[in-house]
């Protein structure tokens, strides 16, 4: 079996796990999936470590049973608004006798790029090379094998709150697996739902989760701006629940099945929806147009908050490739793209991963993590699990019958060998 990647999307309402690898045509294929409800994470931060661990274990168990593969090592996400991006350069002299650039040279130049002032309360997460420069010649994506005297790299240094990272890693460790890497969520999600052309021209990615919405502006293939808006799908559900006086879970179900922001359409094609109001023994009937009015107000508020935030950064209206909406919070609401078009004054579409078996917006981040790792030629490995986190006894995990392989692949072993002296 080829190299495997296990990706975990840690969200405010759910944990999604996928086990994936790359087929011989370079396309990602999902071997196993798992999904569980989670109340232990709010706004990207762990608020209940036991609840989070329980949700992770449940989702991992589902993925293991589906794939028939024992999961030992994983990659996880960190919300873009909780990350800080610093651009820096690294420079080294090529030391080989024949001046041929080797993997060791790439490793050293990436390491030199990390020599940057990082606040004590922050943790290095990732190092992303944007281009290499050999003796003044730039826009080089892979310098190995080239001849030169001086090797430079322009890199994005991603950092995040050390406390947030520590607690995420600890929750994952307690579930019986190790963390190989933490990926900035918008970078991962963009791999699943955006094209490289869109990221070059300029595109706004709106990833709406349960409690928050990530907004990320891409231009020239890079993240130019990322932030978190403290409004998500649960706020829409709460509005429905309060307005109709129904239980929250029923409000969520109605939102997914009948939610719409197209008031005119719902008025012309009205239908009756039966609900069980709190404090009443008899079912109550209301019109879908009434529901649409409730949902439209909250979603319009969310989009306008995003627009106002972008205007403060002077980047509103720069979306040549339009707006892409993903995540479970908004993607299932009827008329959402038309509303986005009107508010942002540009094209809008729903983004979903084009992967067999995981082609719903809710899997965008987990699929994106796997694609992000599998496509990167060099991964800057950081030993997250050494940060005063007690590693679990993996022998206590129940064995999977007829194991094919472990996600601790040759790729991972080579990765650690190559980059073991980074930190």
Image (cartoon, grey):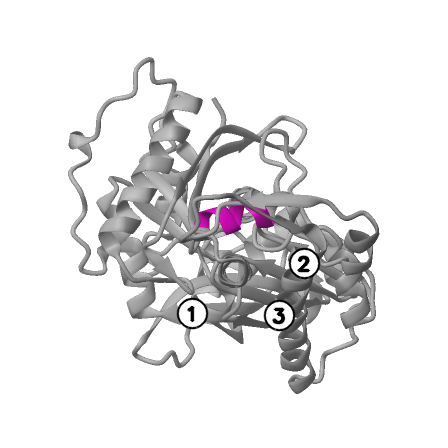
Placement of 300 over or under 233, stated as above or below = below
- Marks 3/2: CA–CA distance: 19 Å
- Marks 3/1: CA–CA distance: 27 Å
* SS label for mark 2: helix
Give the residue number, with chain letter if any, for mark 3: 302
Magenta stretch in the rendered image = 249-255
- Residue in the foreground of this view, choosing between 172 and 370: 172
Give the residue number, with chain letter if any, for mark 1: 159
Whether residue 209 is in magenta: the answer is no
**Occupied quadrant, residue 160:** bottom left
State which mark lies toward you, 3 or 1.
Answer: 3
Q: Does label 3 or label 1 sit earlier along the sequence?
A: 1
**Would you call the spot at circle 1 few (<14 residues within 10 Å), some (14-19), or many (20 or more)?**
many
**Occupied quadrant, residue 135:** bottom right
* SS label for mark 3: helix
**Where residue 318 sits in the image (x, y, percent)?**
78, 74
**Would you call the spot at circle 2 few (<14 residues within 10 Å), some (14-19), or many (20 or more)?**
some
Q: Does label 3 or label 2 sit earlier along the sequence?
A: 2
Give the residue number, with chain letter if any, for mark 2: 290
Relative placement, left or right, of 172 versus 200 is left
Placement of 73 over or under 308, stated as above or below = above
Relative placement, left or right, of 69 versus 210 is left
Q: Is residue 221 visible?
A: yes
The residue most toward the top is: 402
Q: Is residue 376 visible?
A: no
**Occupied quadrant, residue 35:** top left
- Marks 1/2: CA–CA distance: 45 Å
CB within 8 Å, label 3 to label 2: no
Q: Does label 1 or label 2 sit earlier along the sequence?
A: 1
CB within 8 Å, label 1 to label 2: no
**Where residue 100 sits in the image (x, y, percent)?**
57, 53
Q: Quadrant of the C terminus?
A: bottom left
């Amino acid at each position: 079996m080829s190299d495997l990647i296990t990706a975990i999307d840690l969200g405010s309402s759910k944990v999604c796990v996928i086990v994936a690898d790359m087929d011989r045509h370079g396309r990602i294929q999902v071997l196993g999936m798992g999904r569980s409800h989670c109340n232990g994470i709010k706004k990207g931060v762990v608020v209940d470590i036991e609840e989070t661990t329980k949700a992770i274990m449940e989702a991992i168990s589902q993925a293991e049973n589906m794939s028939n593969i024992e999961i030992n090592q994983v990659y996880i996400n960190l919300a873009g608004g909780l990350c800080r991006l610093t651009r820096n350069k690294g420079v080294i002299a090529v030391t080989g006798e024949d001046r041929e650039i080797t993997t060791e040279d790439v490793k050293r130049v990436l390491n030199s790029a990390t020599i940057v002032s990082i606040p004590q309360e922050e943790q290095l997460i990732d190092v992303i090379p944007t281009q290499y420069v050999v003796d003044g010649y730039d826009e080089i994506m892979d310098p190995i094998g080239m001849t030169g005297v001086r090797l430079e790299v322009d890199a994005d240094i991603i950092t995040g709150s050390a406390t947030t990272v520590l607690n995420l890693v600890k929750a994952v460790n307690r579930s019986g697996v190790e963390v190989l890497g933490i990926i900035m969520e918008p970078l991962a999600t963009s791999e699943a739902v955006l094209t490289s052309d869109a990221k070059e021209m300029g595109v706004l990615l709106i990833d709406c989760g349960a409690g928050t919405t990530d907004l990320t502006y891409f231009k020239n293939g890079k993240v130019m701006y990322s932030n978190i808006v403290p409004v998500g799908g649960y706020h829409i559900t709460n509005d429905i629940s309060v307005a109709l006086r129904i239980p929250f879970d029923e409000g969520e179900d109605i939102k997914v099945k009948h939610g719409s922001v197209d008031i005119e359409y719902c008025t012309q094609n009205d239908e009756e929806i039966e609900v069980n109001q709190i404090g009443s023994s008899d079912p109550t009937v209301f019109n879908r147009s009434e529901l649409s009015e409730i949902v439209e107000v909250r979603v319009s508020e969310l989009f306008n908050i995003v627009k106002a935030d972008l205007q403060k950064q002077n980047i509103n209206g720069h979306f040549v490739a339009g707006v892409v909406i993903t995540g479970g919070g908004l993607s299932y609401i009827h008329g959402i793209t038309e509303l986005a078009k009107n508010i942002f004054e540009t094209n809008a579409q729903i983004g979903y991963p084009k992967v067999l078996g995981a082609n719903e917006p809710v899997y965008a981040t987990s699929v994106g993590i796997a694609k992000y790792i599998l496509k990167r030629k060099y991964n800057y490995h950081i030993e997250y699990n050494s940060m005063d986190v007690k590693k679990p006894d993996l022998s206590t995990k129940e064995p999977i019958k007829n194991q094919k392989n472990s996600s601790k692949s040759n790729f991972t072993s080579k990765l650690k060998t190559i980059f073991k002296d980074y930190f």
